[in-house]
Amino acid sequence: MRISAVLLAASLALSGAAHATVEENLAQLQQFSDGFALVASTVTTGVVAIESWKNPDSDESERGPNPFEGTPFEDFLPNPRRFGPNPPGEGQGSGVIVNYKGKYYILTNYHVVRGADELEVKLVDGRNFAAEVVGTDSLSDVAVLKVEAQTLPALIMGNSDRLRVGEWVMAIGNPFGFEHSVTTGIVSAAGRRRFGRDEYGSFIQTDAAINPGNSGGALVNLRGELVGINTGIISRSGGYQGIGFAIPVNMVKNVMGQLIEHGEVKRGLLGVNIKDLDRVTAEALGLEKTQGVLIDGVRPGGAADKAGVKQGDVVLEVEGKPVRDTVELKSLIGETPPGTRVDLLVARGEEQRHIPVVLDQLTAEALARTNAPEATGEGRGDRLGLVVQNLTPQIAEHFGYEGQSGVVVRGVRPRSPAARRGLKAGDLIQEVNQRPVGNTEEYAQALAAAAKRSKSVLFTVRQGDNTHLMAVPIPAQ
């Protein structure tokens, strides 16, 4: 059936087929409108405007860098010199009143309160309160505040796991200083990847208008339940362009509870490097689907290493919950307390096995990343675009590969299959399809054998201090 016919059928169902009058149709639309207005009037009372002040005599560097620097959210942090009339040192944001164990707290974003010397919240009824920071968590971009008040209009926290793509939502906040503004839209997507390399959890994506100053405000469903804390946008102009993001309230609940009870957030840690599966890697591992997370490396002495998790394993489930990508795996492990025993279902070769792992605790040291050496190109190389050479004592000392074995990448042909997959000069190829190679002859033999069996090859590659699995497509000769 053509789209025009479908639309005509829908129109008839609403009018002629149902024998509805114009007045009846208008009455239904009015009920729909009244529903939005009722939700807005109910939830707006529980959303506050937040103003922050920073000592103008203190150096700007004391605030630290913009937490969104280098991401699509870099310009989202409200900057009064760009978005409003406020003097330097003053900022604006939003917050949401909630009740936790009989006490009132205000949820907002970490980047709203970061570096502030004074905070004040303003309710829709005109009351103003000085606010105190209870705790902050930069990895989730969540902060918890409290004020001296006996009664406050708290919002009911819903269940963000039940949100459906296409569901109506409202965003309430303080965009550009326009207090308690309400916008509507739908849930555009769920489980969106975060943009900071060390951030945990995922985003709800919505097309409800979110602008600078909406940070920390409420995303609610049509039952008036809080389902997310608005946190950022993707925009080329610095303002609303239809793509906004909110932190799922289920993650916020976990972070809030830990900040209030313990003053910090403790997260579980597997002790592995992980990658999303793509078609080439899945094919090289003999998998039919790209669902799951590849264990790209196992940190010696970590929780996964002690439990027997191996490089090349593919995590399919955590405690019976399917894992589609790295976002879901990091979220499930990060929200689990350290010391908890979790069951991993992994694919290893043609087998699946359950591996119980007792989680370590995520620390600042565990978040540290080591940069890989820069790439250079040389010659045409082999069919993958690689020029390799034997590992000599001098080369091993230069790159820090003492005690290792393999072949060193001397050059990578630009735009070759190897270059597109991230191989670089100075990398040490230790295995080809999990078969150790000790010299260039063994490497060539292993590559030729791989080309006969598959359209891709899986390398075990050492880059600096880190070891990764890299799948490279093998072009036809």
Image (spheres, rainbow, N blue to C red):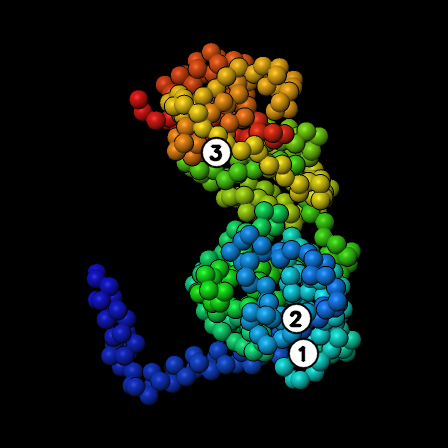
Q: Quadrant of residue 236?
A: bottom left
- Secondary structure beneath dot 1 equals strand
- Gap between marks 3 and 2, in whole Å? 44 Å
Task: Compare marks 1 and 2 and give the one earlier in the sequence.
Answer: 2
Q: CA distance from mark 1 to mark 2?
A: 20 Å
Along the line of sight, which residue is nearer the eye, 35 or 462?
Answer: 462
Q: In this picture, is 77 found above or below 39?
A: above
Judged from the image, the secondary structure of the residue bearing numbered disc 2 is loop
Picture quarter with the N terminus: bottom left
Q: Quadrant of residue 299?
A: top right
Give the residue at mark 1: 122
381 left or right of 231? left
Q: Is residue 48 visible?
A: yes
Q: CA distance from mark 3 to mark 1?
A: 51 Å
The numbered mark at residue 88 is 2
**Residue sitting nearer the eye, 59 or 205:** 59
Rendered image: mark on residue 64: none
**Can residue 348 be seen in the rendering of this structure?**
no
Q: Which residue is mark 3?
A: 422
Q: Amino acid at mark 2?
A: Pro
Q: Secondary structure at mark 3?
A: loop
- Compare residues 345 and 466 and report the one nearer the observer: 466
Query: Which residue is painted at 78% across and 56% down in the image?
Result: 262
| Residue at 59% over, 42% down | 318
Extreme residue in the bottom direction: 23
